[in-house]
Structures are given as C-alpha cells and as structure tokens.
C-alpha cells in the first residue's frame, strides 16, 4: 500500500486505480451519445491521471457489470474498486482526491461560469421534441434567447481580463473557455451539451447557431482544438442516430 495523503479528509492512494464506464455507441464499442459520460471523461483527462475507460453496450450489458452496478446506467466509476454512480458527486469526489500539487484544480474561479448556459439543454429538448408547427417558432426563439445569453457571457470580459492600469478599455473578451483560457469543470458540463445542440438542430431543424454569436463560435472552435474534448466526444453520426426517434417531425 502506497502512503496515503489525506485531502480534505479523503484518502488518496499514490497508485489509485480508476476505471470509468461510459455509454457505448451503436456498434457496442465506440463512444456513445451521453453528455454525462463525456463530462466525466473530460474531467479525468484534464486531471492528467491514469485511468481505464470501458464502453458499456446497454443492449448487451455484460454479467460482470450487472453484478458491479446492478440497475445502474453509465457513466459511473470505480475508484480503488469502490463504486460511485452519481455524476455530480463523482465530479466533487475527483476534484477532492485528485488535488494540487499533484493534480490541477478544475473548479472555476468565477461562480457565474458554473451557471452560464445551464438552461440551454432544457430549451433545446423542448424545441426538438415538439411536433406542432404552430409552437415551433416560439420554442426556437426560446432556445436562441438562451444561446444569446451564453454568447453575451462569453463576450463579456472577466474581472481578471481587465487591467485597471491600462489605457485601453477591453470591451470584448478574448478568453478561450467559460472561466478563462483553460478548461474547468464548467466546460466539462456545458461543452458536451452545447455540441449536441449544434449537431441535432442542424440535422433535424436545419437551424444553425447564428454566426453573429461570435462568443459561442470562438468557444466551440477552441474546444474542437483540444484533445480533451475531441477524443472524448461521440461522432456526429452517433449523436444524430441517438436523436432519430427523439426529434419529432413537424406534422402539418
């Protein structure tokens, strides 16, 4: 047993064994459409810790996994053989045990970053599941309104972007992510959902995130340049397939 150093009352083994179980794609092996799976995948990748990933085919869940986590759908983790199943609690736990100086801190510095864009996915779900043409315009407007709010947050300079001694007044933020130039837990939560929204509304409603929303496009472009996002993300076809039965046709 390696020497255990307590972090806020939680023990961390130097040789911690972490296994992440995520939803499998339609082929039973690749990464499936699940923003919660990607959220935890990104957290572990950003932490820089060694971990194993197992994709779980929900149609043919192996017996050993049935025994490990009966009645539980991915994502879940085992940490030194201890099962943890609640996504929010897993995230808090990982931030606690995988702490500085060995691992980076991922909590945002600005509390507002945690709530930015938090209502987008609910507005998207209402929009994409609607089959009534007369309700479509209003639901689309609601979605675009929440996207606009996120865009404004991304384009508004954070306090640490403003130099009080500078003559120039920074009017538009140039930061790469929600809370600054590095990804945080807030990005792990929002980016997988925002990407799903982008892919699905284009496919099933022929709606694109407006180019005028420069903050969102800067944000997505920066995410697509990072392995922590692209290597944990399902393919667009996988996302489209997952919504094939969810996205309702607008019946005339």
Image (spheres, helix red, strand yellow):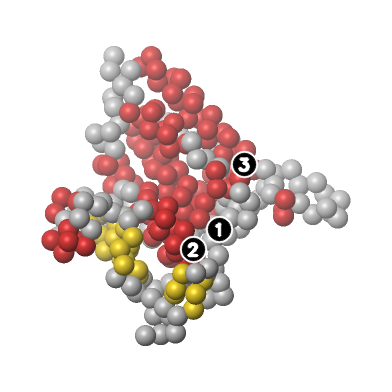
Which residue is located at x 34 percent, y 24 percent?
130
| First in residue order: circle 1 vs circle 3 | 1
Which residue is located at x 62 percent, y 38 percent?
152
> Residue 153 — which label?
3
Relative to the observer, which residue lies in front, 158 or 7? 7
Left or right, 244 with respect to 209, comes to: left
Report the mark closest to the observer, 1 or 3: 1
Which residue is the site of mark 1? 107
Report the mark closest to the observer, 3 or 2: 2
Q: Cβ–Cβ below 8 Å for labels 3 and 2?
A: no
Which residue is located at x 46 percent, y 20 percent?
138
Compared to 68, does 88 lie above or below? Answer: above
Query: Around disc 1, counting alpha carbons within 10 Å, would you say few (fewer than 14), some (14 to 19), or many (20 or more)?
Result: some
| First in residue order: circle 2 vs circle 1 | 2
Which residue is located at x 15 percent, y 60 percent?
62
Mark 3 to mark 2 CA distance (whole Å) = 25 Å
Q: Quadrant of the C terminus?
A: top left
Query: Percent from the top left, x then y, of residue 13?
Result: 41, 78
Q: Cβ–Cβ below 8 Å for labels 1 and 3?
A: no
Which residue is the site of mark 2? 95
SS state under label 3: helix
SS state under label 2: helix
């Amino acid at each position: 047993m390696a020497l255990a150093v307590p972090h806020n009352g939680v023990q961390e083994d130097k040789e911690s064994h972490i296994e992440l179980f995520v939803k499998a794609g339609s082929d039973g092996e690749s990464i499936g459409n699940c923003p919660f799976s990607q959220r935890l995948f990104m957290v572990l990748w950003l932490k820089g810790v060694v971990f194993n990933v197992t994709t779980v085919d929900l149609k043919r869940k192996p017996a050993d996994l049935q025994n490990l986590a009966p009645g539980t759908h991915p994502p879940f983790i085992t940490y030194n053989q201890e099962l943890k199943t609640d996504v929010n609690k897993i995230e808090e736990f990982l931030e606690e045990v995988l702490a500085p100086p060995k691992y980076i801190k991922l909590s945002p510095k600005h509390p507002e970053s945690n709530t930015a864009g938090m209502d987008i996915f609910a507005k998207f779900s209402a929009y994409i599941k609607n089959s009534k043409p007369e309700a479509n315009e209003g639901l689309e407007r609601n979605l675009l309104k929440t996207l606009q709010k996120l865009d404004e947050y991304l384009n508004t300079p954070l306090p640490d972007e403003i130099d009080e001694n500078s003559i120039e007044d920074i009017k538009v933020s140039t930061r790469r992510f929600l809370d600054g130039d590095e990804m945080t837990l807030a990005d792990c939560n929002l980016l997988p959902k925002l990407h799903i929204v982008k892919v699905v509304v284009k496919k099933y409603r022929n709606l694109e995130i407006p180019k005028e929303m420069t903050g969102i496009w800067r944000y997505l472009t920066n995410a697509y340049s990072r392995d922590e996002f692209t290597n944990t993300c399902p393919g667009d076809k996988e996302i489209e397939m997952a919504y094939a039965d969810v996205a309702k046709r607008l019946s005339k």
